[in-house]
Image (cartoon, rainbow, N blue to C red):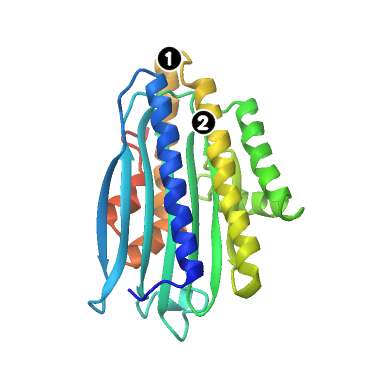
């Protein structure tokens, strides 16, 4: 993989530092619950179809008392898109070379009253350069208090950068995290953004926004987990959780862009599919 420029290196460093802080915060919750669960990290290497070094990443997973299964992955990859995939990526239509670095997180919780969550932020370079990502809350048993707190924290992160961001990116999340064959949303939403121009002078303000999305997630999600993790639950609650997870699987395998991007660019299959829950149900 070619040498990273200063902007690419700065983005990579941030995503990896954020990974470390998130994993530490999740392990602290496990300690509070009386568990000694820790993250297991596995490095992986990507070989570009040309045979050149294609970068790689680190897959981090933990199975504990509170987090039934959580994956926090970072990757930095580069090379060339395949001829059939390149036309679908901005800036790769005539030049298939690309670079991508990012963090991707999915947490499935043991207690049905604690919501699952997804967060992803990334930087992609072709002949164009942009940031994308977001975060969304996915409760099997929704609580308005949790939904309101999650959205309020994301709204504040958006408002610090552009007063139009929250409404625009919330609508994008509502449209994106939707299962048309079920005619229902995957969860209670959040924000989703893509192709936020990072060329030239736009890099720093849009990188700052992307960092604040990560900070907002790290602030609010542990609060929600602590609020619900000791809740009593019933067998009916568990059935609701397993049914919900079935819908979650359907979305990730049928519609998720990150899953498609990872598989089409030779990513680590286990890291790509870490978003799938350990148990699910289809009636």
Q: Which mark is residue 222?
A: 2
CA gap, disc 1 and disc 2: 23 Å
Q: Is residue 163 above or below residue 186?
A: below
Q: Position of residue 96 (x, y in %)?
A: 41, 81
- Tag 2's secondary structure? helix
Residue 266 appears in the picture as rendered:
no
From the viewer's side, name the closer residue of 236 and 71: 71
Q: Which mark is residue 182?
A: none
Residue of label 1: 234
Disc 1 residue crowd, few under 14, some 14–19, many 20+, Cα 10 Å? few
Q: Position of residue 55 (x, y in %)?
A: 31, 66
Q: Is residue 226 left or right of residue 191?
A: left
Residue 40 appears in the picture as rendered:
yes
Quadrant for the N terminus, please.
bottom left
Disc 2 residue crowd, few under 14, some 14–19, many 20+, Cα 10 Å? some
- Tag 1's secondary structure? loop
Q: Is residue 208 left or right of residue 160?
A: left
Q: Residue at x 58, y 48 (%)?
A: 213
Q: Is residue 166 above or below residue 225?
A: below
Q: Is residue 228 above or below residue 138?
A: above
Point out the tag, 1 or 2, that comes first from the N-terminus.
2
Q: Residue at x 50, y 31 (%)?
A: 115
Q: Is residue 79 above or below residue 168?
A: below
**Depth-wise, is mark 1 or mark 2 nearer the camera?**
2
Give yes or no for contact between labels 1 and 2 (Cβ–Cβ under 8 Å). no
Q: Is residue 105 left or right of residue 200?
A: left
Q: Residue at x 26, y 53 (%)?
A: 43
Q: Position of residue 53 (x, y in %)?
A: 26, 72
Q: Residue at x 28, y 45 (%)?
A: 41
């Amino acid at each position: 993989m070619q040498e990273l420029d200063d902007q690419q290196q700065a983005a990579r460093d941030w995503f990896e530092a954020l990974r470390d802080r998130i994993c530490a915060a999740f392990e602290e919750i496990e300690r509070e619950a009386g568990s000694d669960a820790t993250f297991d990290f596995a490095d992986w290497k990507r070989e570009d179809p040309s045979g050149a070094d294609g970068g790689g990443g680190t897959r981090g997973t933990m199975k504990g008392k509170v987090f039934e299964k959580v994956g926090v992955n970072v990757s930095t990859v580069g090379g060339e898109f395949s001829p059939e995939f390149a036309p679908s990526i901005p800036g790769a239509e005539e030049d298939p070379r690309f670079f991508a670095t990012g963090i991707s997180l999915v947490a499935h919780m043991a207690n049905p009253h604690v919501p699952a969550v997804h967060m992803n932020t990334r930087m992609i370079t072709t002949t164009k350069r942009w940031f994308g990502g977001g975060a969304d809350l996915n409760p099997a048993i929704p609580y308005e208090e949790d939904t309101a707190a999650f959205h309020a924290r994301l709204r504040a992160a958006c408002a610090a950068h552009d007063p139009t961001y929250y409404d625009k990116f919330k609508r994008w999340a509502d449209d994106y995290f939707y299962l048309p064959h079920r005619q229902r949303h995957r969860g209670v939403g959040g924000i989703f953004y893509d192709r936020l121009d990072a060329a030239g002078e736009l890099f720093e303000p849009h990188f700052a926004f992307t960092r604040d999305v990560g900070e907002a997630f790290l602030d609010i999600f542990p609060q929600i987990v602590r609020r619900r993790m000791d809740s009593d639950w019933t067998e009916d609650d568990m059935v609701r959780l397993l049914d919900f997870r079935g819908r979650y699987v359907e979305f990730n395998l049928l519609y998720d862009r990150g899953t498609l991007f990872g598989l089409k660019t030779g990513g680590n299959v286990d890291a790509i599919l870490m978003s799938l829950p350990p148990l699910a149900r289809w009636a």
